[in-house]
Image: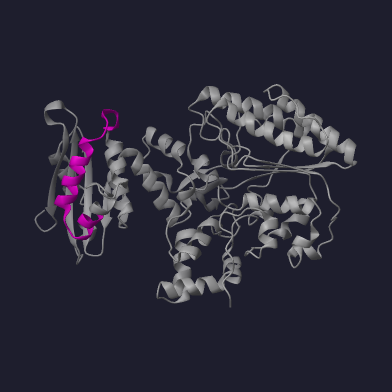
Amino acid sequence: MEMKKLPIGIQDFAEIRENGYAYVDKTGYIPALLQGKYYFLSRPRRFGKSLFLSTLHAYFAGRRELFNGLAIESADVDWSPNPVLHFDFNSGTFDDEEGLLEVLASSLSKYEVFYGLEPGEKTRAAIPVRFGSLLEWIRKKTGKKVVVLIDEYDKPILGREENLELYERNQTLLKGFYGNLKSQDANIRFVFVTGVARFSKVSIFSDVNHLDDISLDEAFSDICGWTERELVDRFSREIEVLSATRNEESAVTLNALRDYYDGYRFTVTGSRLYNPYSVLRAFKTKEIAPYWFETGTPTFLVKRFKSRGIFPPDINGKRCTRNELISIGQSSRSLIPLMFQTGYLTIASYDKDLGTYELRFPNREVEIGFYENLIGEYVPETMEPESPFYFTEFMKDLYSGNPESFMQRLSVMLKGLPTEDHCESAYRSITYLLSVLSGTQTIAEHHGFKGRSDLEVLTRNYVYLFEFKYNRSVEEAMEQIRDRDYAGRYSLESRRVYLIAANYNERKEERGLHYRILPLEVF
C-alpha cells in the first residue's frame, strides 16, 4: 500500500483533488446545507474550515468532475453553476487601520473587474456600498443569485480589543460590509461564514441576525476535523509507517495519536475529533509532538489569562451555558467561552438538569502548548534551552529526587520577575506549570479529609507536597501540612515523599522565596 500525498497547509479543494492528495470526504454534509440559505460555523483554527469552504466553492461553481467517487456524487442535488464571491481573511494583516480596508478593497476589485465593473473607491464609506452594488450587478448580468463565502470573518477583530480604537474601526467597517448579507437577500443564493468566535453585544452580527449558527448543531458536529474511523480508514498505511519508526505496535501508536490530537467535541453526542493539521504533521515528520502552536501563538489569550490571575488548573472542569459558549463580546469577563471557541477547551459532558456544559482540555497537545505559552508569558527564560531556568532543568530536579535544586532554581528565577508579577497566584501558577511541563502527574488543590493541599507532584520514584504562603511564614506553611495531614495518604508509599513549605515575602529586607524541605520520615 503506497503512502498518500499529505495536503499539509493546502486548503484548496480543487488542488487536493486534481493532484491526488489524501482527502477525508466531508461532501456528504452539502445536501443538508442546501435545505437552508444562511449559515455560520465556529471552529478552532487549523481544523478544516477553509477546506470545507473551498469544497462549497467548487460545488456551487459546478465543478462536478472534482467530486467523482465522493459521497455527494450519488445525492440528488443541482449541479448548475452559480456565481461565487469568496472572501478569505486568513492571509490579511490587520495590525493597523489600513489592513482591513486593503483586504476588502482588493477582494472587491478582483470581482468587479471579473464581472465587468470599474473598481470603486478605496474608502471606508465606499466598501459596503461597493459590495451591495456588486451583488446587484452580478444578479442582473448573469441572471443568477450569488453565493457568498466568508472565511475567518473575525480575524480582523479577534485579539485586538486592547487597541480599542482599531478594534472599533474594524468592527464598524465589517458591520457595514456584512450588513449586505441581509439587505441584499433578493440577490443572494447561499451564504456560509466561518470563524473562531461569535461576537455579541456591540456586534458585527447585530444586523445579520438571520445566520443559522450550526456550531453546536448535532447534525453538523463532525463537519470539520476527523473522527477516529475516518483517520484509520484513510491513513492506515501512514499509521503503520509511524509505528514502525517508533518501534511499536500500530495500536500503541494509535493510542499516542489519540492522546495528543483527539478529544475535540463540539456537541454533547458528537464524535471525538482529531485535529487534521497536527495529525498530518505527525505523519510527515514521523514524530508525535505539539504542532498546533507552530501556526501562531495565542498571545492575546495568554496575556488575558495571566492578567486576571487565574490559577491554571482552575480552567479544567469549568461549566458554561449554551449561550455563553456561542457568544463572546469585547467586554466579556469570562475567558472560558473564548477558550472553547478557539479550541483550547472542549465539551467533556453535559448536565441536562442544569443546562450546562463541562469543559476540559481536549488533548495533550493543546494542554502542553497552552501551558508552554503561558509560562513563557510569566518567565520568558523557561523557553530558552540555554537558560538554567529552561523547564527541562526543573524536570531533571523532580525526576532525580532533588527538591533542593528545584527550589533554589525557582527562588533565583522568581527574583527576575517584574515587580507587578510578584503575587501568590503568579508564583503558585509558575510552580504548577513547571511541574506539568515536566511530564509529572500534577494535582492542584487535592481535597483531603482535613483540607486541600496546594500542589502535589508525583513521579515514578518521588512525591512532592507543596504548601505556599505569601507574606506569611515558612513555619506556618509547614504547620498546615502537619495539622491537615496532607501526607497521610502517602504514608505507605514506596516512593520517597518530600514536604515543601514555601513563602514568598515581598518586604524589602526579606524579599524573596523562603522554603523548607523535609522528607516524610523526618516530618
Q: Nearer the viewer, residue 442 or 87?
A: 87
Which residue corresponds to the image point at 64% horizontal and 63% vertical from the top-left? 24
**From the image, which quarter does the N terminus lie in?**
bottom right
148 or 350, which lies in front?
148
Question: How many labels, in total?
Answer: 0
The colour scheme applied to this rendered structure is one colour
Against 443, is 310 above or below?
above
Q: Position of residue 225 (x, y in %)?
A: 59, 57
User: Residue 366 in the image: x percent, y percent?
Assistant: 45, 52
**Residue 322 in sight:** yes
Report which quarter residue 330 is drawn in: top right
Residue 495: where, in percent of width, then height?
20, 64
Which residues lie in the magenta part? 395-422
Between residue 7 and residue 448, name the one nearer to us.
7
Per the picture, the main secondary structure of the magenta-coloured stretch is helix
Q: Is residue 49 left or right of residue 511?
A: right
Vertical relation: 67 (above or below) 208: below
Q: Residue at x 50, y 64 (%)?
A: 284
Picture residue at 70% right of the left edge, 62% below the top: 18
Residue 12 percent coordinates (x, y): 66, 53
In the rendered view, would you say 124 is above or below 221? above
Confirm whether the magenta stretch covers residue 419: yes
Residue 203, can we see it?
no
